[in-house]
Amino acid sequence: MSFFLTPALRFEKATDIRPELLNSMGVSLLILDVDNTIAPYGQVTLDNQVLSWAGEMKAAGVKLYIVSNNKGERPEIFSKLLDVPYIKRAGKPSPRGVRKALENAGVPPERAALVGDQIYTDTIAANLAKVKMLLVEPIKFTNPFLAIRYFFELPFRTGKKL
Ligand SMILES: [Mg+2]
């Protein structure tokens, strides 16, 4: 069971994931979680660092695809800012949204990775869909619930940290 809860690799933040690393892993599609992975909850803009990082990914031949559980407008706003497709209400930990992104992008799971901040949604969805899970630290705890959930994720935040 713990296989489903443990990431392949860990990073401090999404922008620490270098395109060259993904190329060396044979990854040509990077699926992006939104909340607390590329922007804190509620923020409707993307930091310049994230925008330039996304540009570097594309230049290196890594396609990007937003797959978010968010039900609001931010997945679409970020999709436009980054000029990448999106799926919202993805229902992670169900692998449904991740599989849909793979299908739409025409990329097999072994050539895809998902970057996200959560164990019980992102990591499970990635592992069920058989894509590599790249776990990052949440950008910001905006309410106590997020900090409590993080505490219960700690036993599974065990992958190799790069
Ligand atoms: Mg998240």
Image (spheres, rainbow, N blue to C red):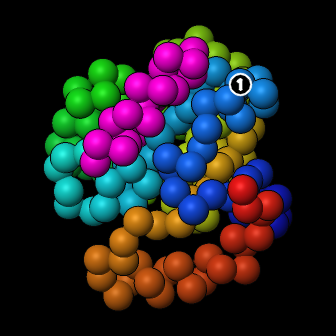
Where 119 falls versus 61 (above or below)? Answer: below
Which residue is at 30% across, 82% downward?
143
Q: Is residue 139 left or right of residue 116?
A: left
Please tell me in which quadrant of the rendered image residue 39 appears.
Answer: bottom left
x and y, in percent, of residue 126 in the image: 65, 45
Side of 69 relative to 156 (left or right):
left
Residue at image position (72%, 72%) is 156
- 135 sits left or right of 45 in the view: right
- Rendered residue at 29%/42% (across/down): 48
Res 118 visible: no
Q: Nearer the viewer, residue 133 or 125?
A: 133
- Image position, residue 49 (x, y; %): 36, 44
The part of the chain drawn in magenta is: 47-68
Q: Where in the figure is residue 66, as x and y percent of width and height?
A: 41, 35
Q: Position of residue 23 (x, y in %)?
A: 71, 24
Q: Quadrant of ligand 1?
A: bottom left
**SS at mark 1?**
helix
Q: Is residue 25 above or below residue 121?
A: above
Can the viewer see residue 136?
A: yes
Can you tell me whether the CB of the residue at mark 1 lies under 8 Å from the nearest atom of ligand 1? no
Residue of label 1: 23
Tell me if residue 72 comes above or below residue 57 in the rendering: below
Residue at image position (67%, 48%) is 133
If the image is split into quadrants, where does the N terminus sit? bottom right
